[in-house]
Amino acid sequence: MKLLFRGTTGSTLYGTDNADSDVDYGEVYLEKPEAMLGVDPIGKLSHLVSDDNDRQRHWLHRWCYLCMKGNPNVLEYLFIPESLIEEVHPLFKELFLDDPTIFLFRKGLFKAHHGFADQQIVKMTKGNDAGWKRKQYVAKYGYDIKFAAHALRLMFQLKEIASTGTVIYPYEEGMRNQILEVRNGHLTLDEFKAAYAVLKAEVIALEDKSYPHIQDEWDSTEVNARLLQFYKEVWDF
């Protein structure tokens, strides 16, 4: 199984990590020709979790599709700084990382980020559906500060991509401090809701604007062409 990309993700990438934080990684792997063109099943790459790190793994084809759908957890791979990239295939970098705009589509980008963030907001007060540590957050603060911080971060990420076509990691000090303020339990539930509502309104106001770096309609032509080029060269067809 050939590794094409491994980069640091999660709180280390965002600049919100602390001494107790795990190190998370995002990885992309090359499929075998037999799995893509033959009858051999490709299988699903598992999400690996250990005591000190978390590895989210994707096949190349699947990763491209998720990026095009605006999935926030994989879209961030496109913006990981070189200092946090452990391994990258040069052609993968050239065809995919060097031009993130081929993956940015208005509907998917906004829908996915809002969807993921809304899930965090729903979960943040449901201590009964969470593990022991999450229940402790709800008991102490009145809401799950980790889910709330994730929701806030997702809105920051969407705002940056929509406005500029990129995300600068780690986050600049102002954004980082707002996320940490929530993550460290410094806001009451009402204070968090008020801050989140302001940010969400700013993001919603961006949805109807036109941006040169975001495509209005789904079009897989360019991504498909680059995938075919990559497979031909790497598989040596």
Image (cartoon, grey):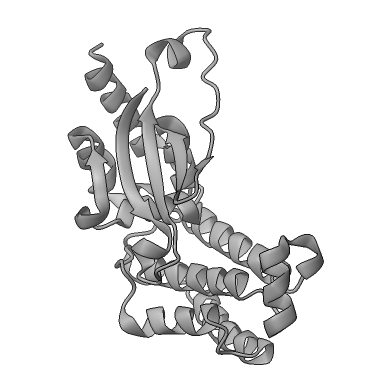
- Residue 127 locus on image (x, y percent): 77, 69
Q: Is residue 137 above or below residue 218?
A: below
Left or right of 225 in this view: 55: right
**Going 48% across and 53% down the picture, which residue do you hit?**
73
Q: Please tell me which residue lies in front, 232 or 16.
A: 16
Left or right of 188 in this view: 49: left
* Occupied quadrant, residue 169: bottom left
**Going 45% across and 44% down the picture, which residue do you hit?**
55
**Going 61% across and 76% down the picture, which residue do you hit?**
145
- Residue 47 locus on image (x, y percent): 53, 39
**Going 62% across and 92% down the picture, which residue do you hit?**
191
Q: Is residue 180 above or below residue 116?
A: below
* Occupied quadrant, residue 190: bottom right
- Residue 178 locus on image (x, y percent): 45, 84
Number of marks in picture: 0
Q: Is residue 32 above or below residue 99?
A: above
The outermost residue toward the top is 39
- Residue 112 locus on image (x, y percent): 56, 57
- For residue 207, say whether it is visible: no
Left or right of 101 in this view: 123: right
Q: Quadrant of the C terminus?
A: top left
- For residue 123, say whether it is visible: yes
Q: Please tell me which residue lies in front, 233 or 139.
A: 139
Q: Quadrant of the N terminus?
A: top left
Q: Please tell me which residue lies in front, 75 or 53.
A: 53
